[in-house]
Amino acid sequence: MATKPSSTSAAAQAAATQPAATKRPAPPKTTRGKAGPNRWDYAPALESTKILQLKDRYELFIDGAWVKPTSKQYFQTVSPSTLKPLAEVAQGSAKDVDKAVAAARRAFENDWSKRSGAERGRFLFRIARILQQRAREFAVLESLDGGKPIKESRDVDVPLAAAHFFYYAGWADKLEYAFPGQKVRPLGVAGQVIPWNFPLMMLAWKVAPALAAGNTVVLKPAETTPLTALLFCEVLEQAGLPAGVVNIVTGDGTTGAAVVGHPDVDKVAFTGSTAVGKQIARAVAGTDKKVTLELGGKAANIVFDDAPLDQAVEGIVNGIYFNQGHVCCAGSRLFVQESAYDAVISKLKRRMETLRIGDPLDKNTDVGAINSKAQLERITTLVNAGVEEGAEIWQPACDLPKKGYFFRPTIFTGVSQSHRIAQEEIFGPVLSVLTFRTPAEAIEKANNTPYGLSAGVWTDKGSRILSMVSKLKAGVVWANTFNRFDPASPFGGYQESGYGREGGLQGLAPYLHIEKA
């Protein structure tokens, strides 16, 4: 399939499809509907939604019961791939947060903190097993509400969520061994705010270690993707978790601010944008609250000329186009050694021509829908900025759904360090390609960012990997792979990517008072 780099504006190329009344840009002459040498044609393989039994309206989950919001207000959550409403969700207020925190405090003092670690672990094991039993239900809902391809929800998000509960269930009765020679005790009430890109997985990353350590939780899911958190409440009921141990309050940013700023919350955990993370840091400054912030990133994916290039191309695609680029640790900056540049770009474009963009519930889909109109507008703005600043844009020819929020996978070449697309987090399927000659130059360019969350290195030399890892300013560095996660491995960054760690033994420490024996 022959394609040429596009020089038209990104706005005309973006797959931003508003409701049917909005005029769409004309599709490219070469479309993915025609079979080409680099792809196979598949019949649609849609995942059925019959397994879901969504309510028309969801209340707040407080003290083990569904409670109407004091505001008496609700908002709609819609599917970004079809723009169809899915359900009405309660708008929690500061008064509702007060009720949730009070319920969590009662549960902590009268029940959960008094249970043995073995008892807490049994509840976590139950939750993990129920998540596995209802995995298909959660995967379908995650794709329907968030826009990510079903194969990612099914094979990554839900299994990893269950794995985190299994992992921390094992630690619940071993805390004295986790921190030998020290006394540990739970903090109290944890206020947690999670993002829209991995709703269920981020819930598991935060709730599992908090409960294992003996804390209780008030959690606020993202406004655009609250449904898997609300379905998780059914898992808590099914597992018989005591009332008040986990409370879920839905709403917009004001609800999250009420959770973070509540005086009776002992621990704050937040995953989201750097801008909001800075607001939270200012809000809790001067208090004795423990804080974990996992914020934005602008990861460098570095490819040397001795790397296995076909494997590296798969890692590049997975690093930036997984979940439509809605990943804080996405490898959005690709650094290619000059001697391998032509080969890498040729292979990368050929691979991108095979990507399927479309219905997230189709098992053949590789790139799903952008999560919201606001995020689509931000992606379009930054891509247009890249074009205006002189970078060369390339996108594969493809047909896009007539409804929903979609954007073509994009490559920018001819990018300089000063370009906005090389400095700002786009949080979309957009890759900026830069070059380097020596390892020292690669390090200098990769570290030229205010972020410090993740990075990747592709090379055949183990000694070079170790050398690069020691010099890259990133909390997580992958070697000859990208975007790989495990419950036993800590994750987090520094600089404007936040502080603290989630996952592994290190993920328990932020939820504990640790003192010398």
Image (cartoon, rainbow, N blue to C red):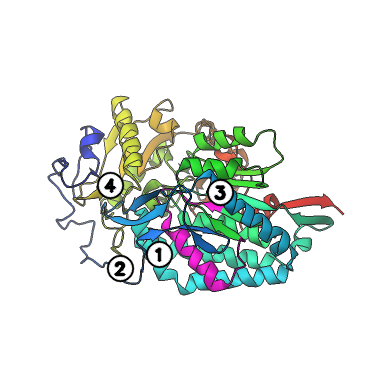
Distance from the alpha carbon under mark 4 to that under mark 1: 20 Å
Question: What residue appears at the point 63 percent right and 56 percent down from the top-left corner?
Answer: 104
How busy is the neighbourhood of tag 1: few (under 14 within 10 Å), some, or many (20 plus)?
A: many
Q: Marks 4 and 1: CB-CB under 8 Å?
A: no
In the foreground, 175 or 257 = 257
Residue 19 on the magenta span: no
Q: Determine which residue is flagged by label 4.
A: 405
Q: Using the rendered image of the protein, determine whether residue 417 is visible from the camera's viewpoint.
A: yes
Which amino acid lies under the numbered mark 3 shown in the image of this protein?
Val
Residue 399 picture location, percent across and down = 19, 50
Question: What residue appears at the point 22 percent right and 65 percent down from the top-left corner?
Answer: 42
Q: Determine which residue is flagged by label 1.
A: 139
Taking the image as shown, residue 446 lies to the left or right of residue 411, namely: right
The label nearer to you, 2 versus 3, is 3
Q: Earlier in the sequence, mark 1 or mark 2?
A: 2
The quarter holding residue 15 reads top left
Q: Marks 1 and 2: CB-CB under 8 Å?
A: yes
Q: Earlier in the sequence, mark 2 or mark 3?
A: 2
Q: Determine which residue is flagged by label 2.
A: 47
Distance from the alpha carbon under mark 1 to that under mark 2: 10 Å
Distance from the alpha carbon under mark 1 to that under mark 3: 29 Å
- Magenta highlight range: 219-245
How busy is the neighbourhood of tag 2: few (under 14 within 10 Å), some, or many (20 plus)?
A: some
Residue 220 on the magenta span: yes
Distance from the alpha carbon under mark 2 to that under mark 3: 37 Å
Q: Determine which residue is flagged by label 3.
A: 97
Element under disc 1: helix
Q: Marks 3 and 4: CB-CB under 8 Å?
A: no
Which amino acid lies under the numbered mark 4 shown in the image of this protein?
Tyr
Which amino acid lies under the numbered mark 1 shown in the image of this protein?
Ala
In the foreground, 313 or 331 = 331
Q: Marks 2 and 3: CB-CB under 8 Å?
A: no
